[in-house]
Image: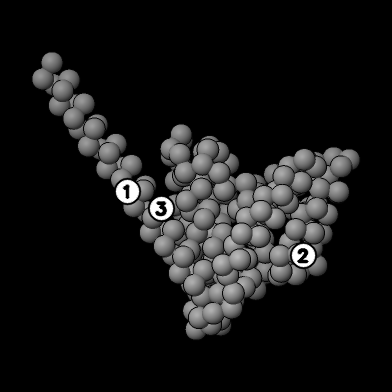
Amino acid sequence: MCDYANLVKTLHQFAEKAKDKPLTVGEALDSLDEAGYAFICIILVLPFLQPIPLGPFTVLGGVAFATLGWQLLHGHESPVLPKQILAIEFNESTWKMLAKVCLEILGLCRKISKPRYPFIAAGIRGQKMGGFILLAAGGLMAIPFGVLPFNNFLPGLAILFYCIGELEDDGLMYLIALFWLVVTTIYFSAFFFALWYFGEKALTFFKIL
């Protein structure tokens, strides 16, 4: 169940099941016979691919991705999500929107991805790198920034490109995921530095007064 057609089809199936009442993430994933880390992560990351901060939901999502990354890094075959994530409910329109976003994003990514650099994506090395990407991106996403723009979008891109790399056996996508981790770290560090710098300036100013 690790191809684009099945992914979009699965999201539409979730929308059908949510017609009568909202479908929780746990109920949705329980309906799958088998799903790997990339398949689950690509479904979960879709709501975060927007520049608007999602508040506590971003923190909760970050914890979930970090948990999955830790599990993958340590070789757990079956991913297990925190109960708080499994309990989140999406209605029919939300699942349909996720399917639409998935189709648009993955359609674009598929044009640039293909099997290459197998020494990066395959085997234990690919598993360890994927686990590190999920753990690092999830940890960055879980930092409670409040209203900082792109605090879920940038680490979400790292997760997205890892998932593409895993689904397509594309080592280049793993490297792009690492690139977005670096960009996210620089962006967050710049924010903290600016906060500290201008905070110091403000304190000095009021002391003078």
Q: Residue at x 46, y 65 (%)?
A: 176
Q: Count the labels in the image.
A: 3
Q: Tell me the colour scheme of the image.
A: one colour
- The amino acid type of the residue labelled 2 equals Asn
State yes or no: discs 2 and 3 in contact (Cβ < 8 Å).
no
Residue position marked by numbered label 2 in the rendering: 6
Q: Under tag 2, what secondary structure?
A: helix
Residue position marked by numbered label 1 in the rendering: 189
Farthest residue, direction right: 20
Q: Under tag 1, what secondary structure?
A: helix
Residue 169 screen position, x and y as percent: 59, 76
Sequence-earlier tag: 3 or 1: 3
Q: Under tag 3, what secondary structure?
A: helix
- The amino acid type of the residue labelled 1 equals Ser
Residue 89 shown left or right of residue 73 in the figure:
right
Sequence-earlier tag: 1 or 2: 2
Q: Give the quadrant of residue 192.
A: top left
Residue 128 screen position, x and y as percent: 50, 74
Residue 111 screen position, x and y as percent: 61, 66
State yes or no: discs 1 and 2 in contact (Cβ < 8 Å).
no
Relative to the observer, which residue lies in front, 52 or 62? 52
Mark 1 → mark 2, Cα distance in angstroms: 38 Å
Residue 149 screen position, x and y as percent: 45, 39
- The correct choice, above or below, for 143 with respect to 40 in the image is above
Residue position marked by numbered label 3 in the rendering: 184
